Image (tube, helix red, strand yellow):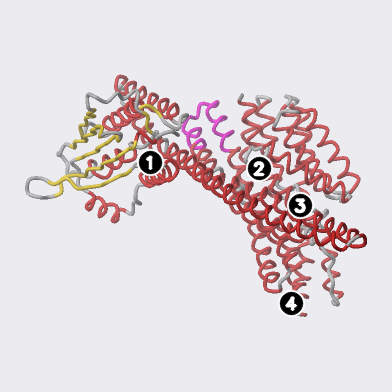
Amino acid sequence: MKRITFFIICAFASLSMLQARALLLPEKELKTDTSSFSYYMELSASNRQTNIDISLEFAFKALSKARTTGKKSEIAYAYNEIGVLFYLKGEYYKAIENYNCALDIDKAEGNTEDVALRYNNIGQAYSDLGDYSEAIDFFKEALSIDRKSGDSSRIAIRLNNIGIVYFRFEQYPKALDFFREALKIDSIKSNASLLPARLNNIGKVYLQMQKFNEALQFFSRALEMDQKLGHEQDQAIRYSNLGQTSLATNKYVEALNYFQKALEIDSRFRNKSDIASDLYYIGLCFKRMNKRNDAEQYFKMSLQKSSEISYTSNLIDIYRELSSISEENGNSTAALAYYKKWATLKDSLFDKHTRKKLSDFQSFYESEKRAQEIILLQKEKVISNLSLAKKEQEIESQRVSKLWYVTLLLLIILIIVFVYHFILQREKKKQLNLKQQLNLYMQKALIQQMNPHFFFNTLNSIQYYILKNDKVTSNKYLSMFARLMRTTLNNSQSEVIPLSDELDALKTYIELEQLRFVNRFDFSIEIEDDIDSGSINIPPFILQPYIENAIWHGLMNLEEGKNGILLIRISRQENKLLCIIEDNGIGREKAKEINAKSGKFPSLGTRITETRISLINQLYKSKFSVDYSDVLNDINEISGTRVEITLGIENIKL
């Protein structure tokens, strides 16, 4: 299982150059009267496969000539060429800077087709940086323009890039669909220079799906075509992918040979990102061959290269492997440090917001595709009707008139049906969107429930007792922590859970916090006798954020020596469940003042929960509500906070 997981994560590295030549070159011939500009641009393009630094010199000379003549289109093309060259060097931020310069000019000049090209290039650079949220936005803009223009060759390029994003999110069937569609278009158009990249991408998907024979066939075909076309730099990508296939089938010596060939080519072209990837895979081969010292040396060389260019996806793999090697070498401190870096980067790369954008983009793409199909069908229908009307007119004019009346009637019926269908679909889409949002915030609630800060704080506390050699307390603490994690994961599998399960999880959480803060507060959970907590269902993670607020912002800010009290009361009022959370803390106003001075933000957990409650009320017409009030003492001073959560349990049919 470790081997499968490893290859799924690491396979991103060699995708960075899949579209280097075909995607990024200007897609129409330069039309200019300035021969020197064309001359320098041609020299820049002709040197890409041999010496990128020389190409850059010619590109900057072309830019200088274009500025002299003041021709905006030439300036934009020069900026784009410079961006391409920085992209090929793996310096993605510099590439984006130059692409944006070209984009600003093209927008001002109204060059719509070139605007789509710039969007595509910027999206590709962000994709290679691991910023998939930005990449999706730019690919969406490019595809929207290309759909309107009907340029199938450009559409194939965009489809391929979208497939790469799905690939990096491990949605392999969808990625395969996009790659195949791009390959089909390019095969029809006979775009020979693009076919190796399409074949390579399909091979990558098969590699992740562990269909190694199919992967080997596609990589070999791509390499053979690159050799015939003279694409030396792209051959390095094919060697790397063949190496990954050999690595997956435990042929370590063969894999090492492929990666060394790739490194030799990439070093000549000074492509930093691919050099970093090659070094990583060579280190991985040595690790599999139990040569840990050699492996660690190559991983650290790759780490240096990746850090220089912020190569996030490669850094994730390197930190994981260095953590593993450090642990095997008995260096637990280094292992933990590398593991924390791995966890932080991985969470930032695959955040829920980006996954939501990807889902929205899939809906956008499919709706755009359906719209184009409908327009095409309508055009064909109009042409057919006109031809039929012309023939009928030659035979009998009266018959044509009747036909038009019938056609008009049918059209009215179709419009009525379409409007009805549109309204029905809009309502369904609204319901679906609410459900999707509810699922999204359910996931956010789970993430908040298992947030890294709570993990690290709890683990640090366990470590503290272990170091004190307090075996009883550390074992008790560890057991409670494990039980809470298991309960949380079990509860997250269902959209509703018994009230008893929610209360068990809350009790464990509070006991952990109580143990961690050395019994600075007491708590009690009171349930009315007529409530059967095992038969009443509620959404999971509804109460915990408010209890966490009571502890952290109310009780923990009490004066030294004052014991905190946390009361949780559960009662039933007809078909409603009333949950009261009350503390004797410092109160809401003082908590706000302390948070403002310390720079803390309002609780994310309560905001997520209140959003979930709002979505449940909209979707199921429920009557969930949350009310806050201050607890007053005998002299009318604020002495705590009360939160009343009302759950309409008769509406919970999630």
Front label number (4 vs 3)? 3
Q: Quadrant of the C terminus?
A: top left
**Amino acid type, residue under disc 1 in the picture:** Ser
Classify mark 4: helix, strand or loop.
helix
How far from the left and from the top, in percent, is residue 542? 36, 37
The residue indicated by pointer 4 is 67
Q: Which mark is residue 622?
A: 1
Residue 78 location, quadrant:
bottom right
Q: Rounded to the nearest whole Å, what is the CA distance between mark 1 and mark 2?
A: 37 Å
Residue in the image at 77% along x and 36% along y: 203
The residue lying toward the viewer, choosing from 321 and 228, is 228
Q: Rounded to the nearest whole Å, what is the CA distance between mark 4 and mark 3?
A: 30 Å
Residue 334 magenta-drawn?
yes
Q: Rounded to the nearest whole Å, what is the CA distance between mark 1 and mark 4?
A: 65 Å
The residue stretch that appears in magenta:
319-339
The residue lying toward the viewer, choosing from 51 and 599, is 599
Residue 571 magenta-drawn?
no
Return the disc, 1 or 4, that comes first in the chain's sequence: 4
How far from the left and from the top, in percent, is residue 252? 74, 27
**Amino acid type, residue under disc 2 in the picture:** Tyr
How far from the left and from the top, in percent, is residue 552? 28, 42
Return the disc, 4 or 3, that comes first in the chain's sequence: 4
| Labels 3 & 1 near each other (Cβ < 8 A) | no
Front label number (4 vs 2)? 2
**Amino acid type, residue under disc 3 in the picture:** Ile
**Can the viewer see residue 124?**
no
| Labels 1 & 2 near each other (Cβ < 8 A) | no
Return the disc, 1 or 2, that comes first in the chain's sequence: 2
Residue in the image at 47% along x and 42% along y: 438
Return the disc, 2 or 3, that comes first in the chain's sequence: 3
